Image (tube, rainbow, N blue to C red):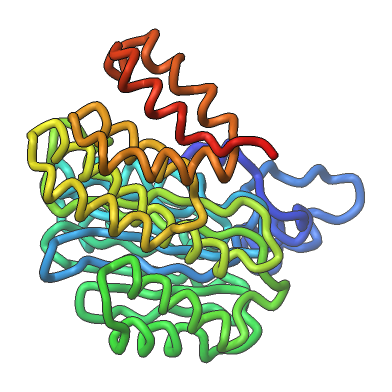
Amino acid sequence: MFMPVARPLCCVLGIVAVLMAEPGSLAAHQGNTPLPAVARPVHTYSIVARDPETGQLGVGVQSHYFSVGPIVPWAEPGVGAVATQSLVEVSYGPKGLELMRAGSSAPEALKQLLAEDDGREVRQVAMIDAAGRVAAHTGRRCIAEAGHIVGEQFSVQANLMLGDTVPAAMAEAYRRAEGDLADRILAALQAAQHAGGDLRGQQSAAILIVAGQRTDQPWRAKLFDLRVEDHPRPLKELARLVHLQRAYRHVDRGDTYVAQGKMDQARGEYEAAAKLAPEVTELVFWQAVSLFTAGEHEAALPLFHRCFRDDPNWAILVPRLVDCGLMPDDPEAIKRVLAQKPKQE
């Protein structure tokens, strides 16, 4: 038997209590009879998917409710991914991953958890495992329009939609989309919105993508873990964050190449980051620091100049980095760096 959900969502407790009850039991909750404590809905649309080329596993979700990211999407590198929604039972996420980690397929894991859940008819859940096996469930008491479509290594699901075309639109968009798994998940979510989406509108969104191989350092295998908690256009904001994270990943790779002494590769990664996010001065600053620390002074100085021009406070940081050992203690070289600060007129 599942325990009651710890975090209630939405604002229709009375309706939910009726939905959780057996048919014909409405009269039992009239008058002074107290309502049972039950989960509240996370009405939403989502997708779970596996990239057959990379093995990456991902979940994308949008809902008209605050902070959907901590509730619906679950994924573990080399294990699987889960989306749990409707009158949400959050434990389908961690318990589903636990079962798949122990060797159950996604269909087996979902079947077992549904059998243990008396509230299965108000749940909507999808799971996919590291082998690409996928399963989904839409309980017969999920609020219409509700449904799911299981495809080749993906599942799309939705409830409380404006119309019944949302899952089909998501599936078609996912199949036709190009790019990596993040691009394709975003395409499916955007198609859901274009098809009408949640009849209440938009509010929050999230994307979670992990590597396809198991690891004893799972935090390193999280490729995307992004959340938009409250926004009038959460999918647009989510796409912006995905774009920005790609830039930061180039910087991370550039720093790795600097540590390995592979300066040509490092410069290529830094240039790629700057091209993706030219508006982010901090990316340029740390690129300059990395190049300068590696002895590439002439390449670093113009970058420092740009940062100091954008915001003179970056120059204040340079001596502090020297003090804590993050830049070389070379007074003459540091003087050249600080000379890049534009002179005040």
Given the current orientation, which residue lies at the most extreme right position? 31
Given the current orientation, which residue lies at the most extreme top position? 323
Q: Which quadrant of the structure image shows residue 175?
A: bottom left
- Residue positioned 45% across, 51% down in the render: 226
Figure label count: 0
Relative horizontal placement of residue 78, taking residue 302 as reference (left or right):
left
Residue 70, percent from left and from top: 50, 45
Quarter that holds the N terminus: top left
Quarter that holds the C terminus: top right
- Residue positioned 14% across, 61% down in the render: 55
Q: Viewer-proximal residue, 247 or 329?
A: 329
- Residue positioned 40% across, 58% down in the render: 83
Above or below: residue 323 compared with residue 338? above
Q: Which quadrant of the structure image shows residue 41?
A: bottom right
Residue 97 can be seen in this image: no
Residue 276, percent from left and from top: 38, 62
Residue 159, percent from left and from top: 56, 73
Given the current orientation, which residue lies at the most extreme front position? 345
Q: Viewer-proximal residue, 285 or 217?
A: 285
Residue 252, percent from left and from top: 27, 42
Residue 225 can be seen in this image: yes
Q: Viewer-proximal residue, 147 or 122?
A: 147
- Residue positioned 51% across, 81% down in the render: 192
Relative horizontal placement of residue 35, taking residue 266 as reference (left or right):
right
